[in-house]
Amino acid sequence: MVLAKVVGSVVSTIKEPRLEGVRFLLLEKIDVKTLKGKKDFVVAMDAVGAGEGELVFYVSGSSSRQTEITAGKPSDAAIIAIVDSFDIQGKTIYSKSGLAGEPKRGPNRGVSK
Amino acid sequence: MVLAKVVGSVVSTIKEPRLEGVRFLLLEKIDVKTLKGKKDFVVAMDAVGAGEGELVFYVSGSSSRQTEITAGKPSDAAIIAIVDSFDIQGKTIYSKSGLAGEPKRGPNRGVSK
Amino acid sequence: MVLAKVVGSVVSTIKEPRLEGVRFLLLEKIDVKTLKGKKDFVVAMDAVGAGEGELVFYVSGSSSRQTEITAGKPSDAAIIAIVDSFDIQGKTIYSKSGLAGEPKRGPNRGVSK
Amino acid sequence: MVLAKVVGSVVSTIKEPRLEGVRFLLLEKIDVKTLKGKKDFVVAMDAVGAGEGELVFYVSGSSSRQTEITAGKPSDAAIIAIVDSFDIQGKTIYSKSGLAGEPKRGPNRGVSK
Amino acid sequence: MVLAKVVGSVVSTIKEPRLEGVRFLLLEKIDVKTLKGKKDFVVAMDAVGAGEGELVFYVSGSSSRQTEITAGKPSDAAIIAIVDSFDIQGKTIYSKSGLAGEPKRGPNRGVSK
């Protein structure tokens, strides 16, 4: 699965009939160390009620049909989880409530001597 | 799914029998911020009646067989929706009727002072 | 599906039993604008009787098992069509009979003033 | 399958119901010659009880559902083995107990003359 | 399928139960014109009894479960053939017995005038 941020949505009227009622969100993959967007975008079906600005992870390929909402649909990307937090080597990089983990730039970042 | 533009079509007489009657379109993936072609092309089966110049999104892999037109066929890419519009961070980047969203280049783009 | 040129073949004696009788061709992906090889190669099963030098498109992944020849075989790439012609924005880029579509380099390409 | 190191974990409360009880680990792919991280990350389901810092290999795509823990779940990456050791051309590059295989830099690396 | 060279092996004790008895080989993809390694590695299940140093091709994705040895296992890469030889544009690039096809560098390579 891949970590990404919900950045927008896509609207379509003329589409494969099985897509009726599905919500299409536009995701931007993120650099997991800096949380910045990687300018790499994907359109995903929303299986969890994600909202713009939220960090999520999505599943690709045939497994993106293994959710209640996407079963039997022509999906190759589905959002399956909204991220609460994640850590790397014991350090919290992201936490939905509060904030953490800008990339380290030096020993005295933001600290007056 | 991936956003792309229909830029052409492919004709084949000698092909796997199951492909009879399928329309093959040539898609160019787009940069979602500028709508420009990325010079990255894919041949996709058309499941929705898309026309040249239209913005669409297509589905890859086994899910590209999950449409009425492509079921049981050797497809790894199928157009499943014609895009009406999409937005990023509340800004309309593309709208089929009218136009929107050239990339911002400065505060006074196109506005005389 | 991806456009590629048949550039060679691969011979194997010791192989998975289900591969008996299958023809393995070496494909080079092409730049669809210039028709030049991209130095990106793949080994594909031949489902249509393609010959060296021909332009084809192949299907990847599980769908490459959806042909009469490859069904039930461990295939992740199968040639499913020999290309007669394809066009981009109304311009014929490739036509098997005759020739078309070198990239435009200037308004008077090959024309004496 | 791809060699990677467990570098962290991901926590999610709002998720597809089938994901209840699954452990999500954050993996960083490694350069197999130097064992260094490649700054290429993936979120994987843990099917073997892997811990942070361990070298593992994971399986992608539909096969990531072919484990006791991930069956029927929307998974596109699952850790299926903790690596004890691996070698390249007869040389042990990695061994979980003890250590081996830093990249060679010269004939007298770390040896006083 | 992709051409690669067997360069090593991977040992694991703690693994998904279905992997018992499977041999994991480390493959390095090759440049098909020069036969040199591309420093791009993958761990594959061995379905044909390949040995280190041999040129093989492997199959990715769900099709890597379509062999007698890998059926039902969480595999995304399986070696399905040991290559005897392959050619590009009529020129033998590789032949297991004897040797062929180093890249051409000049008209008199290795020939005294």
Image: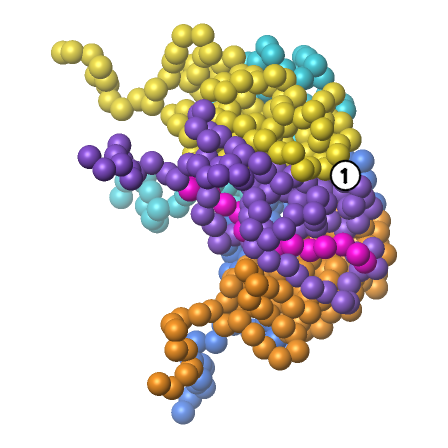
Chain colours: A yellow, B purple, C orange, D cyan, E blue
Q: Amino acid at mark 1?
A: Gln
Answer left or right for A41 relative to E15.
left
Q: Which residue is mark 1?
A: B66
Q: Quadrant of residue C83?
A: bottom right
Q: Specify the farthest residue to the top.
A: A97
Residue appearing at x 84%, y 51% in the figure = C71
Residue appearing at x 76%, y 54% in the figure = B22
Residue appearing at x 57%, y 18% in the figure = A50
Mark 1 Cα-neighbour bin, 10 Å: few <14, some 14–19, many ≥20: many
- The percent coordinates of residue A5 (x first, y second) are 49, 25
- The percent coordinates of residue A104 (x first, y second) are 30, 22
Q: Is residue A95 above or below residue E58?
A: above
Q: Which residues are magenta?
A: B20-34
Q: Is residue E16 above or below residue E3?
A: above
Q: Is residue A77 visible?
A: yes
Q: Quadrant of residue D86?
A: top right
- The percent coordinates of residue A17 (x first, y second) are 75, 34
Q: Is residue E99 visible?
A: no
- The percent coordinates of residue A105 (x first, y second) are 27, 24
Answer left or right for D101 relative to C68.
left
Answer left or right for B61 relative to D103.
right
Q: Secondary structure at mark 1?
A: loop
Residue in the foreground of this view, choosing between B75 and E33: B75
Residue appearing at x 48%, y 26% in the figure = A7
Quadrant location, the C terminus of chain C: bottom left
Residue in the foreground of this view, choosing between C52 and B6: B6
Chain ID, mark 1: B
Q: Specify the farthest residue to the bottom.
A: E113
Residue in the foreground of this view, choosing between B9 and B112: B112
| Residue B23 is one of the magenta-drawn residues | yes
Answer left or right for E81 relative to E26.
right
